């Protein structure tokens, strides 16, 4: 689809018509190759029409061949729109599920397709590539143009323990895990999909230490996964602290401090 370099000084009939149709069909964002089908009308040169609307600041180019109305600013929708097979995840998902007291300075997006990080309208998007087997637990939040995919609570926590550098820190993660209402069945299923033994041991130990309701079957499952290798309870911390042989974990964050973190209000 060719895009001409011609720029009109004022709105042409074709440009005005597209603006009217976007409003009529309540379209806030679109791909260039699908817009004519969405508005049920052919244009002589749709690329030229769209680029002229960008030039007039009626539309905003998100990236090549992807556009949104200039006043559309839902960062979760934009992030998942520009990345195929994606969902909001990690620290951003913790915030959406109201399980985080601190907010990230970027939007974390999980995707099965490689994509470079981007900054759009001043918002930084961090794309984390996962394998197909790790894709699970995705739900949709919001309505209409403001709906977007996000990992559910259990998958978010499993993913954060799997890749804690995207979680906002061990303290935030312990607080979130302690206060979330969790399903053992889902935690087990998602842990199997992600298959990170160290993170399963950490979650199992914390669930047992906190005597978390409804977690007996998950704790039993986690214990069955314990291997011979010792792992730090906080992988980003120093190599020190109590050794817990039953979980093959080294507590570089003490039991007392973990219990204290679990009582913090997000």
Image (cartoon, rainbow, N blue to C red):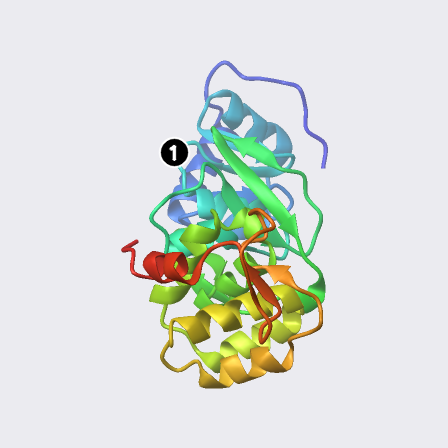
Q: Residues within 10 Å of mark 1 (few under 14, many from 20)?
A: few
Q: Residue furthest top?
A: 9
- How many marks on residues? 1
Secondary structure found at label 1: loop
Quadrant hosting residue 195: bottom right
Vertical arrangement, residue 115 with respect to residue 53, above or below: below
> From the viewer's perspective, is 120 left or right of 180?
right
Question: Which one is in front, 171 or 20?
Answer: 171
The quarter of the displayed image where residue 211 is located:
bottom left
Look at the image and tell me whether residue 245 can be seen. yes
Q: In the image, residue 119 lies at what x, y percent? A: 55, 31
Q: Is residue 161 above or below residue 28?
A: below
Compared across the picture, whether 148 is left or right of 109 comes to: left
Judge whether residue 44 can be spotted in this image: no
Q: Position of residue 198 (x, y in %)?
A: 63, 65
Task: Quadrant for the N terminus, please.
Answer: top right
Residue at image mark 1: 71
Could you tell me which residue is drawn at 37 percent across and 60 percent down? Answer: 256
Front position in the image: 72 or 188: 188
Q: Point out residue 236 in the picture as x, y percentages from the top left corner.
A: 57, 47
- At x 47%, y 50%, the residue is 91
Residue drawn at the location 29% of the way across and 60% of the way down: 263
Residue extending farthest left: 265
Q: Which one is nearer the viewer's eye here, 65 or 204?
A: 204
Q: Is residue 131 above or below residue 62?
A: below
Q: Nearer the viewer, residue 248 or 92?
A: 248
């Amino acid at each position: 689809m060719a895009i001409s370099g011609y720029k009109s000084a004022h709105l042409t009939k074709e440009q005005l018509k597209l603006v009217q149709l976007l409003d009529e069909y309540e379209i806030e964002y679109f791909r260039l190759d699908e817009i004519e089908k969405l508005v049920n009308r052919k244009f002589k040169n749709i690329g030229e029409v769209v680029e002229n609307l960008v030039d007039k600041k009626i539309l905003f180019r998100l990236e090549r061949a992807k556009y949104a109305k200039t006043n559309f600013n839902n960062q979760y929708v934009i992030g998942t729109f520009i990345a195929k097979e994606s969902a909001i995840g990690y620290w951003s998902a913790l915030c959406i599920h109201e399980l985080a007291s601190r907010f990230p300075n970027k939007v974390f997006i999980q995707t099965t397709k490689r994509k470079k990080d981007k900054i759009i309208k001043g918002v930084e998007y961090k794309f984390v590539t996962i394998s197909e087997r790790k894709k699970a637990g995705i739900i949709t939040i919001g309505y209409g143009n403001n709906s977007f995919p996000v990992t559910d609570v259990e998958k978010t926590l499993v993913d954060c323990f799997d890749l804690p550098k995207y979680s906002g820190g061990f303290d935030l993660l312990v607080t979130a895990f302690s206060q979330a209402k969790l399903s053992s069945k889902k935690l087990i299923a998602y842990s199997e999909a992600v298959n990170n033994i160290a993170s399963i041991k950490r979650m199992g130990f914390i669930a047992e230490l906190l005597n978390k309701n409804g977690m007996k079957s998950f704790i039993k499952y986690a214990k069955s996964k314990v291997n011979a290798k010792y792992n730090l309870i906080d992988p980003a911390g120093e190599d020190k602290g109590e050794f817990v042989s039953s979980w093959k974990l080294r507590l570089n964050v003490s039991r007392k401090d973990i219990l204290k973190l679990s009582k913090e209000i997000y």
